Amino acid sequence: MDFLDELYQDVILDHFQNPRCRHCIENAKAEAHLFNPLCGDEVRVMLNSDGTRVDDISFVGNGCAISQASASMMAEVVKGKSLDEIRELQQKVSDLIKGLPAKHVETTDGDSSDSLGDIVALGGVRKFPARVKCAVLAWEALGKCITELEGTAKAA
Ligand code: ZN
């Protein structure tokens, strides 16, 4: 694959054109709205939780294919997971996008990439430093939501 093919893999274009979980949640327990001024991306993440797992999650937003596909993949994968699992996943994705893991993450069918599924495609941004912010935007919004949930749980 050449550079641009790696950035715009089919799975990314598919999520961009057919976003999953793209709608508003009424009375969401936690919500975060983030912008990426470098690219003009905008992602608003909403979720509901019983305090231990995410029962429902959705996003709305505007921006480039990478930012919106990342949000769609994030929402699809996170739904139904426990907060602990999500924290772990968030770290893995952050490492993947920033190119930290030494393991091969270049294909979607390798052993080391099983737990990440489609998200592995986001690893293509490693070679485009200017696009890293696009890919992490939704995950940062998710992190803020989880922090908000945990804060609410402690205060209660
Ligand atoms: Zn972008």
Image (cartoon, rainbow, N blue to C red):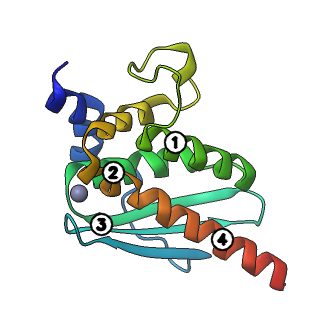
Which residue occupies 35% across, 51% down? Answer: 135
The extreme bottom residue here reads 155
> Of label 2 and label 4, which has the lower sequence position?
2
Q: Which residue is mark 4?
A: 147
> Of label 1 and label 4, which has the lower sequence position?
1
Camera-side mark, 2 or 4: 2
Camera-side mark, 3 or 2: 2
Q: Which residue is mark 1?
A: 95
Q: Secondary structure at mark 3?
A: strand
> Of label 3 and label 1, which has the lower sequence position?
3
Q: Is residue 123 left or right of residue 91?
A: left
Q: Secondary structure at mark 1?
A: helix
Q: Is mark 2 within 8 Å of ligand 1?
A: no
- What amino acid is found at the position of numbered circle 3 in the picture? Gly
- What amino acid is found at the position of numbered circle 2 in the picture? Val
> Of label 4 and label 3, which has the lower sequence position?
3
Question: What numbered label is drawn on residue 61?
Answer: 3
Camera-side mark, 1 or 4: 1
Q: Nearer the viewer, residue 122 or 72?
A: 122
| Residues at marks 3 and 2 touching, judged by CB atoms closer than 8 Å | no
Quarter of the C terminus within the rendering: bottom right
Within 10 Å of disc 4 (Cα), the crowding (few <14, some 14-19, many 20+) is some
Within 10 Å of disc 2 (Cα), the crowding (few <14, some 14-19, many 20+) is many
Question: What numbered label is drawn on residue 132?
Answer: 2
Is the residue 4 above or below the residue 144 in the image? above
| Residues at marks 1 and 4 touching, judged by CB atoms closer than 8 Å | no
Residue 57: x %, y % from top left: 53, 60
Q: Is mark 1 within 8 Å of ligand 1?
A: no
Camera-side mark, 3 or 1: 1
